[in-house]
Image (cartoon, grey):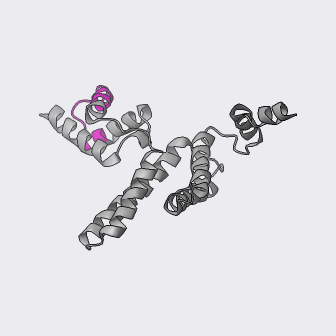
Amino acid sequence: MANLVRTLRSPFLQQCRRLFYSTAGSANSDLRGHILYDIKASMKNRDTVASTTLRSVLSEINSAEKSSKDGNLSSSAMTMIIRKAVQRRVEAASAFHDGKRPDLAAKEEKEVELLSKFLPPLLSVEDIDMYLKAAMQGLPAGSDPKRSLGLALKEFYSNVDKSSVEVHIVKERAQILLQLNAS
């Protein structure tokens, strides 16, 4: 009987049960499941900062999911939500540093570190330039610069996931490359 109990409590079977009884059936359930798992782990470890931070991000994801048309969010949309949460905390940390509140800044920086592990790595500037140059190959010569920028960005984002780049860097690099091509 003891062997049966030990077998039923094995990590493999626990994982199988978790997958079988999970309610999330979409492709984004991996990221959501990872967040939920970390919430449970932080609650067990009594890490209130981590559990509060992860709950707030999960709340934002649930809110965005409810307001979406089909009720599902893609993993890139979830990643964008997490990136925005990280950006808010970075801005708050810099404001706390400016306000001579290092204790609150340290808390925000800890939250940034916690949320950053859920984010995929960003494309480097060289990779962005490579994709932009490929997108600019098909642009008509001598067209309006704003129109060319729009067409280049449209082609760029058709090949690259928006959550894997910072939008302002892509726009800056596209403007620079268009100016170089025009001269």
Q: Quadrant of residue 25?
A: top right
Q: Position of residue 158 (x, y in %)?
A: 43, 34
Q: Quadrant of the N terminus?
A: top right
Across and down, in percent, residue 43 comes to 60, 57
Give the magenta-colored segment's residue range.
130-149
Residue 18, by quadrant, is: top right
Residue 22 position (above or below residue 139): below
Q: Residue 122: where, in percent of width, then height? A: 36, 39
Q: Residue at x 40, y 51 (%)?
A: 113
**In front: 164, or 167?**
164
Whether residue 133 appears in magenta in the rendering, the answer is yes
Residue 181 picture location, percent across and down: 17, 32
| Residue at 32% from the left image edge and 30% from the top image edge | 131
Residue shown at 21% from the left, 37% from the top: 178
Tally of numbered tags: 0
Image quarter (top left, top right, bottom left or bottom right) of the C terminus = top left
Point out the residue furthest to the left here. Answer: 183
Nearest the eye: 126 or 54: 54
Q: Main secondary structure of the magenta part?
A: helix
Is 137 on the left or on the right of 50, as rendered?
Answer: left
Most distant residue in the front direction: 2
